[in-house]
Image (spheres, grey):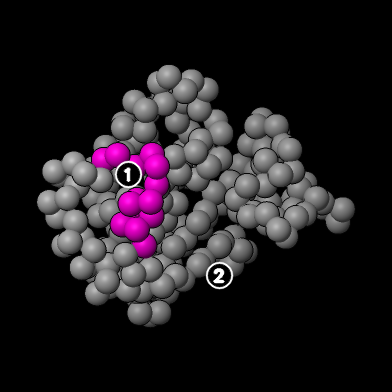
Amino acid sequence: KSPFSMRVSLLAILAAGACAAWAQGDPQVSPYAGAETWAKDREERLAWFREARFGLLIHLGLYSGAAGSWPPASADGKQDERQPPEWIRTWASVAEKDYENTLRPLFKPAPGCTDEWALLAKEAGSRYAILSAKSEEGYTLFNSAAPHASNISPPGRDLFGEFVSSIRKQQLMPGAYYSLVDWRYPDPATYPAYLQQQFKELKRSKTVFLCT
């Protein structure tokens, strides 16, 4: 296995109805919970999660290369075990350009890595698997035509698309984690349209469900 695939953060979670439950309690999402299209198949969606029970969440981004320390691989790097590693740009006070220029060269998911993840999920007994299509840092793992979008997959690749294909080959259900927080996007006024465009792009990738 490559050093990158060994370092990638893989978290198996017991998640009976987790996505649905988070959405119900999210103040940015709950206003839509009463909509007819939301309520119509709510019980069906919850029933599937209650029956599926076990899934795999893979949280991945540029921050993975830092391995919880800033600067990365530095003997005196700043670390804070109380903080989540995916928030290292905030708690280590790193400027966006320094963050991107330092971590992009370290982000090298090996070809075929998503097949390894899918097999791991299958062998662990997972019924579904979720990949962070976009975390708080604002970079995506999928190709997007939206303005200001930046796909950090290796050149010529769409890591999220590879993930969906690999998960489906194992006859599991693929899902996307998509952070509503975005530290890169420059204009709050146009951000809702940006979200909607990326949601549509994820839907076209044949993602079964979306967690925010």
Q: Nearer the viewer, residue 56 or 192?
A: 192
Q: Nearer the viewer, residue 165 or 202?
A: 202
The secondary structure type at the circle numbered 2 is: loop
Q: Which residues are magenta?
A: 18-32
* Image location (x, y in percent) of residue 129: 36, 64
Residue 30: which numbered mark, if any? 1
Residue at position x 44%, y 70% in the image: 13
Q: Is residue 55 magenta?
A: no
Residue at position x 33%, y 52% in the image: 24
Number of numbered discs overlaid on the protein picture: 2
- The answer to which of marks 2 and 1 sits earlier in the sequence is 2
Do residues under tags 2 and 1 come within 8 Å of each other at their CB atoms?
no
Residue at position x 61%, y 42% in the image: 104
Location of mark 2 (residue): 1
Residue at position x 42%, y 56% in the image: 131
Q: Where, by quadrant of the figure, is residue 199 drawn? A: top left
* Image location (x, y in percent) of residue 153: 48, 45
Q: Is residue 82 above or below residue 97?
A: below
Residue 175 is at least partly visible in this image: no
The secondary structure type at the circle numbered 1 is: helix
Q: Is residue 21 magenta?
A: yes
Distance, label 2 to label 1, CA atoms, is: 42 Å
Q: Is residue 44 left or right of residue 193?
A: left
* Image location (x, y in percent) of residue 115: 39, 65
Q: Quadrant of the N terminus?
A: bottom right
Residue 210 is at least partly visible in this image: yes
Q: Where, by quadrant of the figure, is residue 21 drawn? A: bottom left
* Image location (x, y in percent) of residue 139: 50, 39
Q: Is residue 43 above or below residue 137?
A: below
Kindly identify the amino acid type of the residue bearing the numbered disc 1: Ser
Q: Is residue 73 above or below residue 193?
A: below
